[in-house]
Amino acid sequence: MNLHDTYHRLEQDARDYADADRVLRVVRRRRAVRTAAGAAFAALVIAGFGLQSLVRPSGDTIVAVPAMSASPASYPALPAQGPVGQGAAVYTPCRDGCPTLLALADGRQYLLGAHTVTPPGNITLSPDGRWLGRPTENGYELRDLLGDTVRRVAGVSPATGETGYAYGPWAWSADSRRLILAYHLDGNVGKYLDVDLETGVATAPPAPEGYEPVGILNPGDLVLLDVSQYEGVRREVKLRVGAVEVTFRATADGVLADADHGLTVQVRGDRIFLLEYTGEKVAVLQFDRKGALESRTPLADGRYPVGPTPDGYAVVQVPRDQPNGRQRLLAGDRVLQEFPGEAEIVIPGGARH
Amino acid sequence: MTDTDSFREFVATRGLALSRTAFLLTGDHGQAEDLVQETLVKAAARWRKVTALGDPEAYVRKIMLNQLRTWRRPRRLTFVPTADLPEPPAREDGSTQTDLKIVLRHALGLLTPKQRIVLYLRFYEDLPEAEVAAQLNCSVGTVKRHAHDGLKRLRTVAPQLLEKVHP
């Protein structure tokens, strides 16, 4: 048995993903959206009541996830309402066929669904673990895990007013009071919403055409990226920080993006983080808001970047034997949490950026 | 036959083959589905041009490879309402998944898109380096580099896959 043979055996596991009707619907919809350019981004509905005080991030919490079962029946369902406790992570123990679980800071776990969307990119926890965000059939829902509040954002097509479109979590403010949601139509991100979780008010962030919000700096300044910078090899990236354009540069021979590595920008509190690539080596660059480099942290082999946390920049260490091993979430050399080897994980503050 | 009919017929006859390619390029059912979908959307939008060239499958496969090379997948979030998500169990083929299949599937997730494409073309399609270079519109040296880097990474994470394989 070698690589050639294994490829041919693996192809037998492929399914038929091609759906002509779905493809043609998408083509028609995209054409309709293009012709409706300039249409106002439709409104949304935010419903909510009651507020709880924010909890502070717990830098000391370590949640070791116990031995996993792929059976949804092994876990209690998340209660439909009321406080349940501070969230520590959302994860699914494996890519296919495993339930999606909410792990709390006290070690309890709840079932979010037997077959949900993949948590990364779709489900989110606020940096303080208070808010759980999930896509719903009609938009997006943000639930206060420490109280009774539920914020619901209805997905509305900007072209037709039709509901049923999806949002993805894009960027959190460090104080967990604001979340940028990205509206995506058939996988293509179109518009953004800035949700104030304190008041329940959602507004379109002031991002000019061609710019994407990539973070919220203290005390609330939006960080914007000209998305044309996703293309090509980048040794430097310009971000609009508040009203100022700031340049962030790679060090030495590193690049911030090339054909094999996408541009990654993350914001937490007063800091802006970019990943730097030198060959196959990855380093985390930490800048202040004026573009001054504060630290460069190379990642050891086998460690992959996750994002900034109150404990430092988190990475995940994937075991060589993924089916039987454990993934470790680390900040520096400190273990923050452990997960099954094949888990797909969202940590507090986890979003697109 | 209208363009729409022609496209439907193409998907009906070649959809599974394209799906297999996408699965081997990604190692992930969700990503493969997204890749097939996006590829076919692009092909359908210019179907008349695709068919005019005489070999629609080759053209569509080229779209797929380019799509994978330039994919910023995090910006293309999967739009799937929670209620519609039940993932069917993998089709049983009589011999349950071997360890090597599982290892390869997960190892693919650790490679860059270009490494996955080059290894797929070299070791699944058995294309010589010069032909891989021609398909990817790059130099043979670039193909060698991606193959070398991909195999090096596979040796680290899944050495059992590389018996008898030389870059």
Image (cartoon, helix red, strand yellow):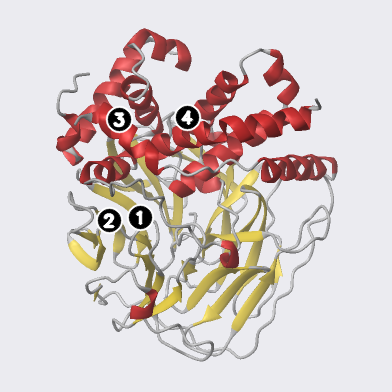
How packed is label 3: few (under 14 Cα within 10 Å), some, or many (20 or more)? Answer: few
Question: Mark 2, mark 4: which one is toward the viewer?
Answer: 4
Tag shown at residue B69: 4
| Mark 3 or mark 1: whose residue is earlier in sequence | 3
Q: Position of residue B32 (x, y in %)?
A: 48, 42
Q: Position of residue A110 (x, y in %)?
A: 39, 80
The amino acid marked with disc number 3 is Ala
The amino acid marked with disc number 1 is Val
Question: Mark 3, mark 2: which one is toward the viewer?
Answer: 2
Residue at image point 44% right, 60% down: A270
Does label 2 lie on the same chain as label 1? Answer: yes
Does label 4 lie on the same chain as label 3? Answer: no
Question: Mark 3, mark 4: which one is toward the viewer?
Answer: 4
Residue labelled with disc 3: A252
Secondary structure under the numbered disc 2 in the rendered image: strand
Residue labelled with disc 1: A306
Question: Mark 3, mark 1: which one is toward the viewer?
Answer: 1
How packed is label 4: few (under 14 Cα within 10 Å), some, or many (20 or more)? Answer: some
Residue labelled with disc 2: A316
Chain under disc 4: B
Tag shown at residue A1: none
How packed is label 2: few (under 14 Cα within 10 Å), some, or many (20 or more)? Answer: many
| Mark 1 or mark 2: whose residue is earlier in sequence | 1
